[in-house]
Amino acid sequence: MSLFLIAALPFLGALFPALLIRAGRNAAAASAGFTTFLAFVGLLLNAPAVLRGEVIQARLDWLPGLGLNTNFFLDGLGLLFAGLILGIGLLIILYARFYLSREDPMGQFYTYLLLFQGAMVGIVLSDNILLLLVFWELTSLSSFLLIGYWKHLPEGRQGARMALAVTGSGGLAMIAGMLILGHIVGSYDLTVILQHKELIQASPLYLPALILILIGAFTKSAQFPFHFWLPHAMAAPTPVSAYLHSATMVKAGLFLMARMWPVLAGTPEWFYIVATTGLITMMLGAVIALFKDDLKALLAFSTVSHLGLITMLLGFGTKIAAVAAVFHIINHATFKAALFMSAGIIDHETHTRDIKRLGGLRFLMPITFTIALIACLSMAGLPPFNGFLSKEMMLEEAFHTSWMGSPYFIPGLAVFAALFSAAYSFRYIVHVFLGPKRHDYPADPHDPGTGLWLAPAFLVFLVIAIGIGSNHIVGPLVSVAAGAVIGGELPYFSLKLWHGFTPALWMSLAAVTGGLLLLWLHPRLSKMWNVAPRPEAKMIFDSLLGTLTRASRGVTDALHNGSITRYSAIMVAFTIAISLYAYQSGVASEATRAVQQAGALPMIGWICLVSATGFIVLNHRNRLLALVLIGVVGLIVSLSFNYLSAPDLALTQISVEVVTIILMLLALNFLPKETPVESPLAIRARDAVIAIVAGTGVGGLIYALMTRDFSAPSISEFHLANSYKGGGGTNVVNVILVDFRGYDTFGEIIVLGIAALVIYALTEAILGSKVRAYLLNRKPDSPQDGDPHPLMMVVATRVMMPLALMVAAYIFFRGHNLPGGGFIAGLIAAIAMLMQYMASGFSWAAERQKVYYHGIIGSGVLIAAATGMGAWLAGQPFLTSAFGYLHWAPLEEFEWATAALFDLGVFLAVVGAVMLTLESLARLAWQPGMSSEHAMDINPARDDAAKLKEEV
């Protein structure tokens, strides 16, 4: 199965649970499970090749100029993580089906879960660091939805916000680090980056890139000092905790460190930053876990500790330590997911996770006890379970690692952490399941149905099987995954239970013995722990967040006082300052072009333009006059375009001017005629100085550009040379819009449609509020014309309507070879319809409207999109146009290009957007009695007579 399909399946499957929930909870769960199963099968189909040492690749150049390619690759490390994500994901889907109550929106849950699953699969399969960053941030967003799934719980909402704030901030740092890494190598493809270890480590940017990337990894994998978010994420439902914190989200940071190990590891900086951070996290998490009374809190801090263990192993920088890290990733996923699920079962059946209210459950819940017992013994590192094997490998590597010249520092602290790890594992067994039965459980404890215990039971089966037959069951997978991490030849290792009387064995015995002693001392130690002063990470985080919030609010309040004049002054003044710095620090070349002699006609136009602009400044408080003068400026600019041989720009400018002036006239209908004087003279003087300096600077810059040759050749030569043979048109401007830069045009019509829909939505909101009463009862501030529909204007617009539409059609069809096109034609057609509203009134025109403008906008966007996607059928990139010549009798041979269909989409989107905007503003202006069904009635009093007759 294609890697593209494997990565896409979870996202596609996310659509179905929310839809199929109407068919029942089983249908929603089955759809989520089936999608995950398909992706898992697709992964397994590729597994034999990967296990043979092959690397499977799938490449799609999307934006190669920016280095953003949709490339995926599957090697041993990707196979391991993708297998954990999809395999444990299947078990979580089964578990969640029976865990969630009927009040929980299950369809929504599975949708969030599959979105997160897809993001994780995307991370581990990405062969482009920019693509990886996209999926990385998607995991933060989708995990936010999962952790905050129980919206009614304040702690759930707070945990989601905390996780998003920490991991999202780390993601921003990682983006910077990855961009630096790509800059060093000159490529953003991972397979290329991983081949340049010497180049990266010799670069002066190595350390900044390393620190930034590690911040992203540490925040995601809850490493000290960012560990505090993970325990607070335990407010999520147990299926979320079991999935995110055993095999997926928290493993993303470990995956990143393992993936970048070949090029970033092996330096003192890597060792001291990564190994030290992992060691501190391993100890801190283990100590705190022992004194937690909430089952999920205990497991959360134990997860922090084991994540620190793996981070420490990766930080050692040796090949065998990398092998041990890979092996423990597998083992931790199996026993920790089983433990989270067992904690969920206990909570589900007893209605509490408080260890102090539990005990004696081995008699009442024997199946759950068996599952938890095996998983806990593996977590404690006891044989013959899989946790023992990887713990022994960790202790062996710790024994042979020195820190700052001391051979005892790391081994001693590793045993200390392993001791506490054994202690909290034993406590989970003894304090929850052993002891006498109690009579004050919050609910009647009993083993759940098969649906809840089947998934953790399968995982503990793997715990046993891997522990006994690890060489055969996971040996090949560990080898290819570790080989991908190391990037070279594997060292000798053996995954077996007995290695003789090694230092690691004695260290392990000390840890287990010490763990039993700590469990016996737990009551006294717990009292000391509760009274001991210690920093609380959550309080520090809340305090820091509060300080930042107050500081940002203070800066915002100081700068943003609601005055647009002030904002503009600050922005323009800052622009002037940096421009002045650039001018003084740069070197300006000598002028290479002679200044041309200005003719009489350009001078007249320039004088009119300057005069109109000056009158706008002097009379800007008179809104209507200012609008008329703005129209004059637009007209002169249009004539200037035409004089400078840019008829397309001239047509567009004049059309936009007409539409804009009409719409602004409607808007001015709701505003006073005069703008009040709000700024004192000193402020206006300041603004005048800033405006004059900025205007002079822009004028000087334009003069400098026009009198010098550009440093790079103009792209216009390319467009002129390829307009016809590449786009099938001789009108270069139109070919640029619908072919060369068609993607830009496509985005612009979408934005235009969105703007019109937002105006419509705001109108709906206003008409549904108290403002409607004001609009209905407002009185004009000056006498109104007695004839709202002048006969001459009505007749003229009726006659002009078909003519204008004919002109629009002519402009549209000729646009590919002569000045015109869909955008200009759409504006002309919109003007023709606008005039009908102006002449005959909103009511008259609305009654004759046969198609909703929303649909016209949507049709335009869909036609443009379908035209672009049609290129895919020919194996071409999106929006690649095709053209040729047709001969339809009795017509002469003519050219036809697919770009015309795209232009049709532009035409419809422009017409729909303009008309929807007009209709929205006209609805605001409507008042009772202002419309007549007789738009060309020479005797408006007829309506009054008809009303009087009805009253009689």
Image (cartoon, rainbow, N blue to C red):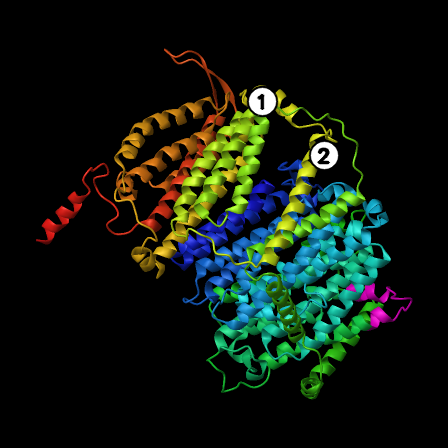
Q: Label 1 neighbourhood size at 10 Å, few (<14), some (14-19), many (20+)?
A: many
Q: Label 2 neighbourhood size at 10 Å, few (<14), some (14-19), many (20+)?
A: some
Magenta stretch contains residue 636: no
Task: Please name the residue shown 52% across and 58% down the image.
Answer: 678
Q: Which residues are magenta?
A: 393-412
Task: Please name the residue shown 55% across and 83% down the image.
Answer: 357
Q: Position of residue 139 (x, y in %)?
A: 60, 56
Q: Quadrant of residue 537?
A: bottom right
Q: Quadrant of the N terminus?
A: top right
Q: Amino acid at mark 2?
A: Ala
User: Mark 2: which secondary structure?
Assistant: helix
Q: How far apart, in angstroms, are the residues tagged by discs 2 and 1? A: 30 Å
Q: Position of residue 868 (x, y in %)?
A: 51, 32
Residue with the mark numbered 2: 704
Q: Position of residue 902 (x, y in %)?
A: 47, 30
Front position in the image: 360 or 158: 158
Magenta stretch contains residue 410: yes
Q: Amino acid at mark 1?
A: Ser
